[in-house]
Amino acid sequence: MAIDFQHQTTLITGASSGLGALFARRLAARGSGLVLVARRTDRLEHLAAELSGVPVTVIGMDLAQPGAGAKLAAAVAERGITVTSLINNAGFGTHGLFHEADPQRVTDEITLNVTSLTEITRAFIEPLRAHGRGVLVNVASIVGYQPSPTLAVYAATKAFVLSFTEALWAESRGTGLTVMALSPGATATEFFDVAGQGADGGTARMRPETVVDLAIKALDRRNPPASLITGARNRVMVGAGRLAGRRITLAALGAMMRQTARR
């Protein structure tokens, strides 16, 4: 049965572009009110102007700053908004050899991808569970299924997101709240403008519209999965890594990713 978004308010982080902006468009079309959060307020306002027919609130905030979860919860409360669905999409990756990485960049990556996501989830999960008809989607990645050389920190943060969200799926059963970890592979978004073009390892990139549509289709299932890998090719890649074993997979990934890191 399709989820009824017409009487809901969905908070989406990282909504200024990519998957976040597409989730906003798709859910607005389903009738959901929206709270759009990102650093680039001008982009959020442009998107909000595009989404007619539903209430849209824009909150400009850098979620990579310490205490972002509490600050976001306070900003939402000040506006008198009750959030009933949450999509934690904000995040970024760094591509390259770890010993050459900028230390502050590494800290920001962990803060945004792990700490802020966890804090935001904690800030809103009680009203989500009380409402009992919404969704909690945390965006992970297929690299969360195995260590990924030259994406060492990013893959580790997404492994946390995957494990954390699957645990919340089990904890939330029977509450009416639908919880799912979304694990895309390489997707044609601005992610690679930040991480670097070689971060995809030379693999084909999926259209972001396809990723979001597959996610919403999974959420509409009678029994939505705890986690979703989007695309048959990505499922095969993850499955092959499990069959080959961690040592062989690491060696193959390391050779491929080091080559792209040097380009």
Image (cartoon, helix red, strand yellow):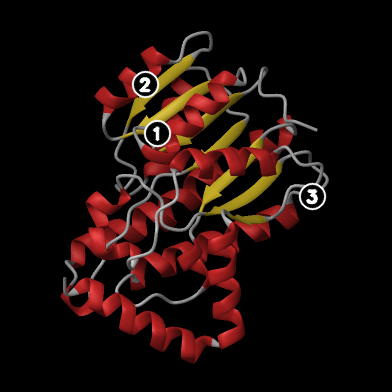
* Picture quadrant where residue 195 is located: bottom left
Tag shown at residue 47: 2
The residue depicted at 65 percent of the width and 33 percent of the height is 127
Q: Residues within 10 Å of mark 3 (few under 14, many from 20)?
A: few
Secondary structure under the numbered disc 1 in the rendered image:
loop
Q: Assign a secondary structure to mark 2.
A: helix
> Which residue appears farthest toward the top when viewing the image?
53
Disc 2 marks a residue whose amino acid type is: Leu
Q: Quadrant of residue 149?
A: bottom left
Examine the rendered structure and indicate whether residue 49 appears above or below residue 101.
above
Instruction: Report the number of discs.
Output: 3
Percent coordinates x, y for residue 32 in the rendering: 59, 21
Q: Position of residue 218 (x, y in %)?
A: 68, 44
The answer to whether mark 2 and mark 1 are in CB contact below 8 A is: yes
For label 3, the residue is 173
- Disc with the residue nearer the chain's start (3 vs 1): 1
Q: Residue at x 47, y 84 (%)?
A: 249
Give how far apart the Cα atoms at labels 3 and 2 are.
Answer: 34 Å
User: Which residue does the numbered mark 1 point to in the structure image?
Assistant: 15
Q: Amino acid at mark 1?
A: Ala
Distance between the alpha carbons at the discs numbered 3 and 1: 28 Å
